[in-house]
Image (cartoon, helix red, strand yellow):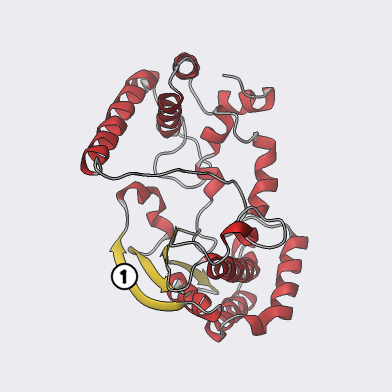
Amino acid sequence: MGCKPRDQEYLIAWFAPHVLGDLDVIAIRVHATENAACRDLFRLCLSNILRRVSWQKEDDLRVRKEIRPDADIDAVAEFLTESARTVRTILAFLYEDRTADSGPVEIIAGDARCLTGTGMPLDRLTSKVNAVVTSPPYATALPYLDTNRLSLCYLDLLSRPEHRGRDYMMIGNREVTENRRRAYWSEFQSQRATLPGEIVALIDQINTLNEAGDVGFRRRNLPALLARYFLDMRTVFYHIATLLAPGAPAYVIIGNSHTVAGGVHVDIETDRLLGLLGQGVGLTLEDSIPMEMLISRDIFKKNAMASETILCFRK
């Protein structure tokens, strides 16, 4: 385990000692794998089992602990099972796709709100992209960093003390300081006219209901966070439209969520509202296709509606 001392202390609180020992043995073997592609694949498999072999409460989005007996956790067996499953899946895909040429691949780390503009890495692709496929965050419904915090720490991808700062930067973030909440709300008030009327009405409705009731800090923060989310997504759609070639499609997979404001259940129809945002930057919404919630997203179901939607845009 090559992570920083603060991360080691954090991991010790979330894994049984024998499990951390087994994970370190696995990590050493993975690091010693000569083939780079295989090494990355095994590293991904290791990441996939970390939550499963930890004391993280199962199927719980929040950071809650449930200490299990040592005999119930076998990290090596979990890793071998996960690796075999992953390899079978890849082989099946390669078999079906064996006549296709995948072509060159380039991975660029960046912010979806800053895809184009002077000096941005994708400026060279303005009006040249043949298709966009993306699944943006839900509207403040899921704690993405918390869900993956064990992998981020163990694999030394993001140190635990840096999580809060990075969380503030994410689209769909659920965490906010009081100063940030006020800044987001002020920005919303100054940019209300740039958002579709239905989005503005939803945010105002939730804010009014919460102000009339005795609510906790999360519900009090929600209107400002929703405002920030939809302003961010408007920017994302602008960049997507800038990159797409004329007539090219963009597919956006998104799920809905809900809240209780002032004792009233309020659905947040993110799919329909993002459809309005996309159309607002000049994209044509050709279709909206409902789909069943993916099995891999089971831990998200408490915070989501029963299905996700594929929004089919075209420039």
Counting labels gives: 1
Give the image location of residue 281, x and y in percent.
Answer: 56, 77
Give the image location of residue 219, x and y in percent.
Answer: 59, 65
Residue at image point 52% right, 83% down: 198
Foreground: 219 or 142?
Answer: 142
Question: Which residue in the structure is indicated by mark 1?
Answer: 289
Foreground: 134 or 297?
Answer: 134
Residue 53 visible in the picture? no
- In the image, 287: left or right of 200? left
Residue at image point 71% right, 72% down: 185
Circle 1 SS class: strand
Q: Quadrant of residue 48?
A: top left
- In the image, 260: left or right of 219? left
Residue at image point 42% right, 63% down: 254
Residue at image point 70% right, 79% down: 191
Give the image location of residue 39, x and y in percent.
Answer: 44, 24
Residue 218 visible in the picture? yes
Give the image location of residue 72, x and y in percent.
Answer: 34, 23
Foreground: 24 or 236?
Answer: 236
Instruction: Categorize mark 1 by other alpha carbons within 10 Å: few (<14), some (14-19), many (20+).
Output: few
Quadrant in the picture for the N terminus? top right
Image vertical order of residue 175 relative to residue 182, above or below = above
The kind of residue tagged 1 is Ile
